[in-house]
Amino acid sequence: MAFARKDGGGYYDITVWSRSGAFPDDGALLNIAVEVLPTIPDRTAR
């Protein structure tokens, strides 16, 4: 995600597995992102 036009952005691959094999809903993915993204080095909350 780029935070400014001059920022090249970037990406992270996160794999989410479920026991049922179903895709997680958007709320579950958002909750995972809220927990995981702040723990990635050199990524600060904005």
Image (cartoon, rainbow, N blue to C red):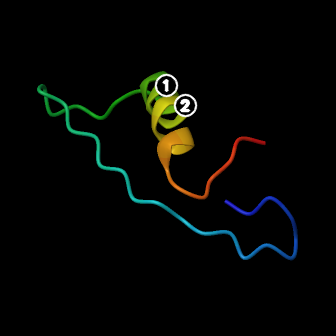
**The furthest residue to the right:** 5
The residue under the point 43% across, 24% down is 28
Above or below residue 40? Residue 8 is: below
Q: Quadrant of the N terminus?
A: bottom right
Could you say where residue 6 lies in the image, as x and y percent from the top left?
A: 86, 76
| Relative to 23, 19 lies left or right | left
Could you say where residue 35 lies in the image, as x and y percent from the top left?
A: 48, 30
The residue under the point 53% across, 43% down is 37
Secondary structure of the residue carrying tag 2 is helix
Above or below residue 34? Residue 46 is: below
Kindly check if marks 1 and 2 are in contact, taking CB atoms under 8 A apart as contact. yes
The residue under the point 30% across, 35% down is 23
Q: Which residue is tagged 2?
A: 34
Could you say where residue 38 lies in the image, as x and y percent from the top left?
A: 56, 40
Distance, label 1 to label 2, CA atoms, is 5 Å
**Viewer-proximal residue, 38 or 19?**
38
Secondary structure of the residue carrying tag 1 is helix
Could you say where residue 26 lies in the image, as x and y percent from the top left?
A: 49, 29
Q: Which residue is tagged 1?
A: 31
**Viewer-proximal residue, 13 or 18?**
13
Q: Quadrant of the C terminus?
A: top right
Q: What's the residue type where badge 1 is placed?
A: Asn
Q: Residues within 10 Å of mark 2 (few under 14, many from 20)?
A: few
Q: Which mark is residue 6?
A: none
In which quadrant of the rendered view does residue 13 lie? bottom left
Q: What's the residue type where badge 2 is placed?
A: Val
